[in-house]
Amino acid sequence: MANVVVKYGGTAQARAENIAQNGETARDLFKDHKRIVTVVSGAGDITDRVENAIAKAKNYRKGEISEEEFYNITDASYVFEPWEDLFNQAGKPQELSTLKERVYREFEKVTRDVMHRLPEGEASHAMRAELNLYPEQLQAAIVNYIYRQSGLESKCVNFDDQDFPLIVDGHYLNGKVDLRNLQSRCEGIISSGKGEKIIIFPGYGGIDFSAKGEKVRKTLGRGGSDTAAFAYGYGFKAREIWLMTDVEGIKRAIINGNGTETVRELSIEEAGDGAFYGAKLPSRDSLEPLSMMVTEGLAPEVYIAHHSNIRGEK
C-alpha cells in the first residue's frame, strides 16, 4: 500500500459541502492507498484580500485613503470572509473558535503596526509572509473539522504544531524547502499518529527557525501550494500526486476557433517550460522536489484533474 498526495486549490473548497465531497471522493478513489496526504490552499480570494490590506496601509500613510476606509479594508471579518462563510456553514464549531479569534487578532495587530509604526506604511517581508499564511492555517483546520464530521479518519498538522515537517530557509516570500530532513520528519508524523488515513497540511508556506530558535513563517513564493504538494510527495514517498483544480487537466490552445482538448501527458521539462510561458502548470521551482524524487529512483505519477470530476479527463 502506497501513499498519495492530493492538493486542493481555493475553488475546489468554495463551500463546506465541496470539502465534504472532496473527502468522500478521495477516500473512495484511494481506498487501496495506505495514506492520503492532503494539501490545502486558502479559501476563495483571501490571498488577494490580504495583499490588498497590505497595500492600503501604504495608501493610508500617503494620505490617499481615509482612516475609515483603511479599517474597513483591513477588518479581519472582511479579509477572511470566504473562510468565515465556511465556518458558518460548518455550524460555527466551538473547537475552531479559539483559533479563529487568535488569527483575526494577530492579523489586525500586524496590519495596524504597518499603518502606524513603519516608515511610509511599508510592510516588511516577514510581516507579509506572516499575513499571507493565515488563510492556509485556517483552511487546514476547517478542512480537518469537516472531514472528521463526515466520519473520515483525519488529522491536521498545522504551522504551529511541534512536528510540522516542512522546514524552509531563504527569503521570507520565496522560501526553499529543506528536503534533507523532510522524509524523517514525515516518518515521525506517521509514527506519532493514531492510524489516521488522512493527514491535512496547509500549503503555500513552511517554517524556518531563527537564530533564537523561534519559528518564523515563510511563503514558498509563486505556486507555493504546488511546491508544498510536491515536497510532501517527496517526504512521504508518494506513489501518486494529484493537483485538483477547476479544469480537467491542461488544455491545448484554441486555434482558429476550433475546440480544444486535454493534453494527456507532459514530461517534467515540458511542464516547467509551459509554466515559464504562462500555462497553468507548476513552475520549475515547484517541480524541484519531483525532479529529486526521480533522481533518487522514485517515479510518482502526477495528475491534474477537476476536483468534481476526478475520474474524468486529466
Image (tube, helix red, strand yellow):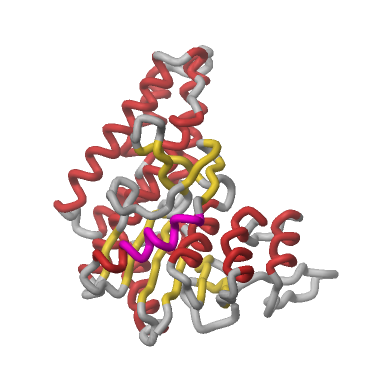
Q: Residue at x 59, y 56 (%)?
A: 286
Q: Residue at x 34, y 35 (%)?
A: 213
Viewer-proximal residue among 128 and 162: 162
Q: Which image quarter holds the N terminus?
A: bottom left
Residue found at the very far left of the displayed protein = 94
Q: Is residue 133 left or right of residue 295?
A: left
Q: Residue at x 40, y 33 (%)?
A: 210
Q: Residue at x 28, y 50 (%)?
A: 161
Q: How many marks?
A: 0
Q: Is residue 126 left or right of residue 161?
A: right
Residue found at the very far right of the displayed protein = 256
Check if residue 174 falls in the magenta segment. no
Query: Is 214 situated above or below 156?
Result: above
Q: Quadrant of residue 72?
A: top left
Write down the region rendered in magenta.
Answer: 179-188
Query: Is 258 situated above or below 104?
Result: below
Q: Which image quarter holds the C terminus?
A: bottom right
Query: Is 126 situated above or below 17?
Result: above
* Percent x, y of residue 268: 68, 67
Q: Is residue 166 left or right of residue 196?
A: right
* Magenta-colored segment: predominant secondary structure: helix
* Percent x, y of residue 230: 53, 63
Residue found at the very far bottom of the displayed protein = 32
* Percent x, y of residue 91: 19, 58
Query: Is 127 situated above or below 165?
Result: above
Check if residue 184 falls in the magenta segment. yes
